[in-house]
Amino acid sequence: MRLIRRLPLLQWARGYGGAVLGTDLLAAVIVTIMLIPQSLAYAMLANLPPEVGLYASILPLVAYAVFGTSRVLAVGPVAVVSLMTASAIGPVVQAGLADPLDAAVGLALLSGAMLVAAGIFRLGFLANFLSHPVMSGFITASGILIAAGQVRHLLGVGGGGATLPEILPSLWGALPQTNPWTLAIGAGALAFFHAARRWGKRGLMRAGLPGWLADMLARAAPILAIAATIALAKALELGGKGVALVGTIPQGLPRLALPGLSAELLVALAPAALLISVVGFVESVSVGQTLAARRRERIAPDQELIGLGAANIAAGISAGYPVTGGFARSVVNDDAGAQTPAAGIFTAIGIALAALFLTPLLADLPQAVLAATIILAVLSLVDFRAIRRVLDYSPRDFLAMAATILITLLVGVEPGISAGVVLSLVMQLYRSSRPHSAVVGQVPGTEHFRNIDRHRVLVWPEILSLRVDESLYFANSRFLEDRIAALVAEHPRVRHVVLMCPAVNDIDASALESLEEINRRLAESGVKLHLSEVKGPVMDRLHRSDFLRHLSGKVFLSQHEAICRLRRELGPDAAPEQEMGPGCRRDGVSGG
Amino acid sequence: MRLIRRLPLLQWARGYGGAVLGTDLLAAVIVTIMLIPQSLAYAMLANLPPEVGLYASILPLVAYAVFGTSRVLAVGPVAVVSLMTASAIGPVVQAGLADPLDAAVGLALLSGAMLVAAGIFRLGFLANFLSHPVMSGFITASGILIAAGQVRHLLGVGGGGATLPEILPSLWGALPQTNPWTLAIGAGALAFFHAARRWGKRGLMRAGLPGWLADMLARAAPILAIAATIALAKALELGGKGVALVGTIPQGLPRLALPGLSAELLVALAPAALLISVVGFVESVSVGQTLAARRRERIAPDQELIGLGAANIAAGISAGYPVTGGFARSVVNDDAGAQTPAAGIFTAIGIALAALFLTPLLADLPQAVLAATIILAVLSLVDFRAIRRVLDYSPRDFLAMAATILITLLVGVEPGISAGVVLSLVMQLYRSSRPHSAVVGQVPGTEHFRNIDRHRVLVWPEILSLRVDESLYFANSRFLEDRIAALVAEHPRVRHVVLMCPAVNDIDASALESLEEINRRLAESGVKLHLSEVKGPVMDRLHRSDFLRHLSGKVFLSQHEAICRLRRELGPDAAPEQEMGPGCRRDGVSGG
């Protein structure tokens, strides 16, 4: 059982064959056709030679098929991770720590090792640091950055840059050098892709083709465009006319090797590898869960970490670069009828065949066509409506999202996503630093106690009852100190403070210290601290500390009992009860 | 009113004089006597010339008296912040970015600016990041590091180091060079201080002195030791015998100036300044609150940020280094009868007089005496019992504390406290990533619904009811997706999922996305999602989003209503109810 959990392959591979083999094979053919141009294009986006994209689409797919839990997730190079890779290896290469290929491989290995470790130690929850608005803002900003960065390939000009303030002026300055041939091919490809996506399937069906064939042909549009533009480039000798071509791609399969990586290089790459792991994992799990739910299946997030980690390690030892599960290709895989991860293995075989036999044909492919592929793919990532939605729903979340987008666009991908994560945490800390609490009084004629700001209740001037509605822990424990200090300073007649804890599920060591501090301070000013309605497990825990021995007052089972006993203790000289409620004010008690 | 809140001086200075002036003056004399040796010693600990310690005890005290809200808090150089200063300026000086004096001044200015900004923008809650166990572990580890680092001054040997693995071997190696004169003076001073603290007051009272005089003399022990050892050093010409003396201290007051600081220096100092601000603020507020509570007064944490910030800026423009509120001296100030912050101003005048007239006398003071002062002061910071207490109470908090202590001792102060903060956050995220939730069923014959793992209840196989007991936000929203996916995958007969939300106070944008995702996924597999018992404010917020329009099911006021309506909808063919409870298992439903 444990082995099956760790090697999901053992489950689906038993008795594999027959009809399932057929549908898996068909899905693999369709995904392969889609993946060839994407692999080349995303490698270009990562500033790596095109063959690296192909290599990243072979062994990683096999590794995921062995270790992953989604039946239809298609892993490989994706746009956002490619952008993050480019941004991570740039400085490392510039500092002379490694050449781009070694840096990419190091990034994949590091990220793979982190993911596997997170899976083994069940640290998947760490991905929760990345909130939805931050992730969605980051993807939108990445899409914009990627599209802006590819425009120069459409124009056939030089330049570059990793942020909008770098990309845009460089583009503007290079505009006069636009190569008309490149622009014609790029714009043509873009228009063709757009038309094929929008009207292709419908048009072909209207022309009488059966649905499945129309669908497949529409999906093959990029491959058709590639074939056509290669032919065009050869016929017109576009290479001599200043059109940037892909150039010679080494023919054959990647050599398996563990590259020699310096410790210095790994340290320099570690922060980026961590961010890539988190973003890749969150993206992949979300795709995987969506597709699994359609079939009432499940994916196991901790095992997914191992699956993705294995895929990245496989990319690292086969001259690839970081990979993750892609949305579009997984949906295509699912739609095409993939039933098991074997479809991934067949896709890997398809890409391997392409690397073996198709690469010589690709030398004359204009880079502008790949740029058009990328631009069309990433524009679907840009989701302005999501921004609007978050703004309407939660201004605080919008702030984190807007910061992520702006910093990603203006400063870079790593600062952008880091700022988003930190801001979410800070705002969450702020939110939870003020636990909901209320000064309460007795509802006349009952044993119930309610917020004095909302209900007509009875209070006794010597007794202050405060109900806390959340667990107490380090983020909110100091607030409680402040709150009680303020209340007691406002009410000089108070001699007993009762903390009503019906909703306190936990008291951590910080909150315990705060309670001890509150108890000590109150005692020094002649006020006793009592607790009431403490839950069983919390009480058990308090017994493991000194707190109850030092507590100046008592622990009461109910608030009603507390009030009865304390009134008896105060004796006949005590001030009489007062009626309180919304609108009436007795020496400044405030419900907060 | 607002002005008084911002300038607390306006409140206490009105009608100041008379008896209050007298007690404030007396308190100032006592604190001044205590502060002179401490200022010199802590400056030595920060690897700064002794006069810097005096300067940090003049203007900052005046600034705090103007802006601070505690009536008795005594600010100035303290041990932990001095250690952090030494650790922060070391690398900067080594990198050639600044000389030690400029770096110290830069650190004070940066930290002051951060504190003031935090006060203005009400960011005091950020100090909550520093949990009690982490702070307490950090202080203990700092005390050990400081004491270990001062031993070499007691022995009169060279060496240094900022962590135990650096300090201890260096000490061991230098042991043979121990200077007997230095050791004799240092050990003598240590024994004398210890005896004075332990038996001084009692002994003097037994000798017939009145209590107040005995107390004052006991407190003056360090000053007596200083006078005696200066005389001894002069008489025996110890300087020529290899005993390290304080040396010439410039006579006079600090020059007020804004030093020219490079942006590069400020960037390099920023992380350390942030940590110093947080640690100083937490320490100071805790002292201030404790002392204020004794008098049923309050301090205002946000205004305290401004008070401490002003003190640090004052330190920065008067050639000082970072300061904060000290525990021991504030207690002495309070015990000696200080009534208003004017006592702080008088103390500043006292230290200024010392800087003007006493400094020539201090040149022959053996450094070993200052080291003895430091060691005695910091050993009271080391609190092993707190470690034991946290271990007994909360193993998770203990982990954060132990990591803080070990990393501080072995790697350094900044990594130590950062690791503690990060670990607390990660563990809190882990804790909150699994919100308390339970599958519920109906208690027979009532309208109540309870956890099926704890109570005998009725369930209907087509309806799954899940109660969530916490607010939903980014840290736990993905858990809900997993939980519901797992439950629905386990129960193929389920056609309705009801999410019971009586304890959900908030749903942030991440959790909303998750709910939308859950709704979409359930709908794709033919299951409807319903909500019940949603609180008013949460409902209002949901109305601001599309969620309710896309929701496949309904929102019910009560869980009872939900069950009645859904059973009617399922019609007569629905499976009959089943009785569930602890011990009995129906196709694997689990309460979790």
Image (tube, coloured by chain):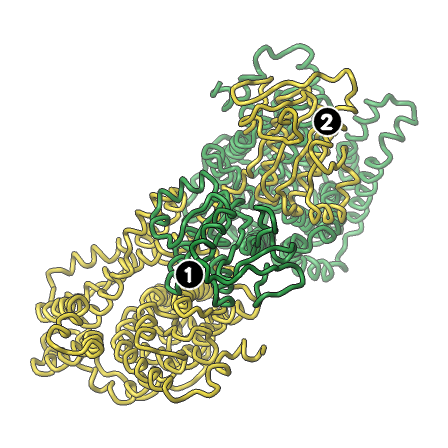
Chain colours: A yellow, B green
> Label 1: few (<14), some or many (≥20) within 10 Å?
many
Q: Is residue B355 left or right of residue A317?
A: right
- Which SS class for mark 2? loop
- The amino acid type, in three-letter code, at marker 1 is Val
The numbered dot on residue B489 is none
Q: Is residue A363 left or right of residue B222?
A: left
Disc 1 marks which residue?
B527
Q: CA distance from mark 2 to mark 1?
A: 57 Å
Residue toward you, A117 or B18: A117
User: In percent of the image, x 76 and y 49: which residue is there?
Assistant: A544
Quadrant (top left/top right/bottom left/bottom right) for the N terminus of chain A: bottom right
Q: Where's residue B173, x and y in %? A: 72, 62
Residue toward you, A146 or B442: B442
Number of marks in picture: 2
Q: Measured along the vertical axis of the image, is residue B417 above or below residue A314?
A: above
Q: Residue A48 occupies which quadrant of the picture? A: bottom left
Q: Where's residue A284, x and y in %? A: 40, 67
User: In percent of the image, x 67 and y 19: which residue is there?
Assistant: A577
| Front position among marks 2 and 1 | 1
Q: Is residue B362 visible?
A: no
Q: Where's residue A568, x and y in %? A: 78, 24
> Label 2: few (<14), some or many (≥20) within 10 Å?
many
Q: Is residue A364 left or right of residue A110?
A: left
**Furthest-front residue in this view:** B572
Q: Is residue A472 visible?
A: yes
Q: Where's residue A280, x and y in %? A: 41, 66
Quadrant (top left/top right/bottom left/bottom right) for the C terminus of chain A: top right
Instruction: Write down the chain letter for disc 1.
Output: B
Residue toward you, A473 or B558: B558
- Which SS class for mark 1? loop
Disc 2 marks which residue?
A527
